[in-house]
Amino acid sequence: MYLLNPQTALIQTLDFFTPMVDDPFAFGQIAAANALSDVYAMGGKPLLCMNILACPGEKMGAELFHQVLAGGLSKIKEAGALLVGGHSVEDAELKYGLSVTGVVHPDNLLTNAGAQVGDVLVLTKPLGTGILATALKGGLLLEDALPGLTQVMTTLNKLPLEVLADASFAPLRSAVHACTDITGFGLLGHAHEMAQASQVSLHFMMATLPLLPGVLDLVNMGIIPEGTYRNKKYYAPWLHSTLAEDGSLIMLGFDPQTSGGLLFSLSEQAAQALLAGLKQRGYPLAARVVGTVQAGEEGKIFVG
């Protein structure tokens, strides 16, 4: 974040990755939504985007690249931002993403360092994209599960910020204390980062987590990406659990998410207003209260 003037702070972010779905248009949408998410997680509004494309030119035709870029552009337009350029290189593997410039009023800037004791935690998207994407790559994902997976990954984290910016929410805006988007570290990994930065502990009610349909069955079959195990191993020192160490909900908590939802720390009243605002606006995904913020045990994550 860079302060331009007392009313405007600049946000700059960049993200790109390899495909996790076969449809090039959908891949472009997912990669763009994922890159835009960092701006939303800071309470900002995306303004300008630049394409980042690595393409194996001899293996794939120009039409495929055009479809990827078209998918990305559709999400840039949905975000109300402008595509102002980009850069492409030849590479052995297809990669796509965006560099995004956004703005936020300094008073409305959100970080992962402001969670307060007594807050509740709201998650705005269901979990399980990493596990379902792994099943897809292995040919084990049921055909009727693919639309739901794609919908979660292509949905912008824009609507929750629009609720926060609504005039009716203004009296509660100061009660929104922290936010992070859930991506590669998984829910519990990013939760630790928030707890540590805020000098609090976070407590999750795992049975309340919104989950993609069929994901528990896949976990029980052992369809778990390697990144889940890496996350679990790294964050184990900060995890206190009354659940089985390798239980399905623990593994889902560490599942790396692609274009995951936002995790808000906010007052109970603000949480209910946020959820009501999402419902009124026809938000298509499951969003709910999943935990609380408590004092002591700084950086620790409690699950039960």
Image (spheres, rainbow, N blue to C red):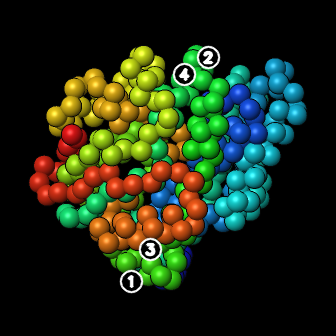
Q: Residue furthest left?
A: 296
Question: Which corner quadrant of the image does residue 269 belong to?
Answer: bottom left
Of discs 3 and 1, which sits in the foreground? 1
Q: Are marks 3 and 1 in contact (CB under 8 Å)?
A: no
* Residue that carries the numbered disc 1 in the rendered image: 171
Question: Which corner quadrant of the image does residue 11 belong to?
Answer: bottom right
In space, the residues marked 3 and 1 are separated at their CA atoms by 13 Å
Q: Report crowding for label 4: few under 14, some 14 to 19, many 20 or more residues within 10 A (C-alpha).
A: some
Q: Which amino acid lies under the numbered mark 2 shown in the image of this protein?
A: Gly
Question: From what the image shows, is residue 138 above or below residue 147?
Answer: above
Question: Which corner quadrant of the image does residue 287 belong to?
Answer: bottom left
Task: Say which label, 3 or 2, has the lower sequence index.
Answer: 3
Q: Report crowding for label 1: few under 14, some 14 to 19, many 20 or more residues within 10 A (C-alpha).
A: few
What x and y, as percent, mark residue 118?
20, 64
Residue occupying image coordinates x 71% and y 22%: 92
Inspect this view and state whether residue 10 appears. no
* Residue that carries the numbered disc 4 in the rendered image: 135
In space, the residues marked 3 and 2 are separated at their CA atoms by 44 Å
Secondary element under disc 1, as helix, strand or loop, is helix
* Residue that carries the numbered disc 3 in the rendered image: 108
In space, the residues marked 1 and 4 are separated at their CA atoms by 44 Å
In space, the residues marked 2 and 1 are separated at their CA atoms by 49 Å
